Image (cartoon, rainbow, N blue to C red):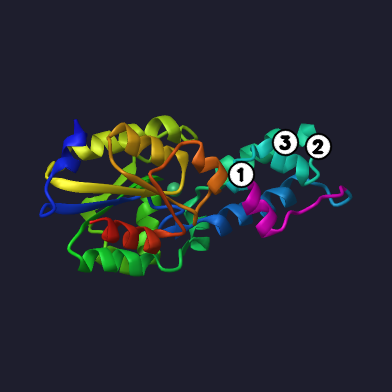
Amino acid sequence: MLGDVNLCERSCLMRLISDFDGVIADLSERYYQVYRWSLTQIAPDDQAITVLSKDEFWQLKRQQTPREIIGQKSGLTDKQIPQFIELRNDNAHNLANMVHDRLIDGSLEALQMAKDLGWEIMTVTMRRTSELAEMFKLYPELGQVIPGDRRFTMPDAAERDRDLELKPLLLAETLITLPQDSQTWMVGDTEADIRAAQSQNIPVISVLSGIRDRQILEEYKPDFFADNLLAAVKLIQSAQ
Ligand SMILES: [Mg+2]
C-alpha cells in the first residue's frame, strides 16, 4: 500500500524517517557504564574479573553477541550470569543513566541540512516516550529539527527486546497517521529498521554509526549503506 508513496513525482514532499539511537544518539557509553557497574555489584573482591574495554564491549554489541557470552568473557561464572542480565535489563534504560548519551558527530548537522532542503523530518524509535523526552531535555537543539508531533515512540510500558517484530508495527501505525503524498526514505542502524522499511516498501539506508556492524546488517539487505546520518542525507539528496 505504502509503495504508492514512493511513486509520487519529483516535486512531492521528501520525508526522512530517522531511527534515533545509533543514528542520532550514541548510547554506547550508557550501556558500557551499566556493564561496568553491574560487574562491581556481582563479583566479590577476590574474584578475578576481566573488565572489557569500551572498544571490546562495543564491538561485541555490534556483533550481536548474547549478554551471556559478554558476562562469560568478563569472568563471571554461569551461576552469576542471570544476575548480570537482570542488572543490565533493570538499569540500561533508567532515565538517570541517559546523562551518558551523546549526539553522534554530524547528526544534528545532517538534520539541519535536511530541514534546510525542505524535507519533512521525523524519528520513529523504539525508545520509550519518557526516554526520548529525556534526550530532548539534555539536547534542546534537537527540538529545532524534530518537532514534537514528529517523534514516534513506544509507550513507556512496552516490552523490550522484540524490536524485530515491534518496529515494523510501530512504523506501520505511524505511517497510517500521516498524509501519503511524500517520497519517503528511512535511515536506521539495526535489522529492525531494515525489516520495518521493507515491510512498507520504503528505501532504507543502514548507517554504521550504531549498534550493528556491516556484516550483521548485510544479511537483511538494506538498499544502501552509509557511515552515518550526514552521509545518508547526502546520499538521498544525490538520488533525487
Ligand atoms: Mg537504532
Looking at the picture, how far across and down is residue 101, in whole percent? 49, 60
Residues rendered magenta in the picture = 47-60
User: Which secondary structure lies at badge 1?
Assistant: loop
Image mark for residue 146: none
Looking at the picture, how far across and down is residue 170, in whole percent? 31, 36
Q: Using a 10 Å C-alpha cutoff, classify the residue at mark 2 as few (fewer than 14 neighbours), some (14 to 19) or many (20 or more).
A: few
Under mark 1, the amino acid is: Gln
Image mark for residue 77: 2
Give whichever of discs 2 and 1 has the lower sequence position.
Answer: 1
Image mark for residue 63: 1
Give the residue at mark 3.
81
Identified at 28% across, 68% down, the residue is 112
Q: Are marks 2 and 1 in contact (CB under 8 Å)?
A: no
Under mark 2, the amino acid is: Thr
Distance, label 2 to label 1, CA atoms, is 22 Å
**126 vs 148: above or below:** above
Residue 157 shows in the view: no
Q: Along the line of sight, which residue is nearer the eye, 207 or 75?
A: 207
Question: Residue 133's quadrant in the figure?
Answer: bottom left
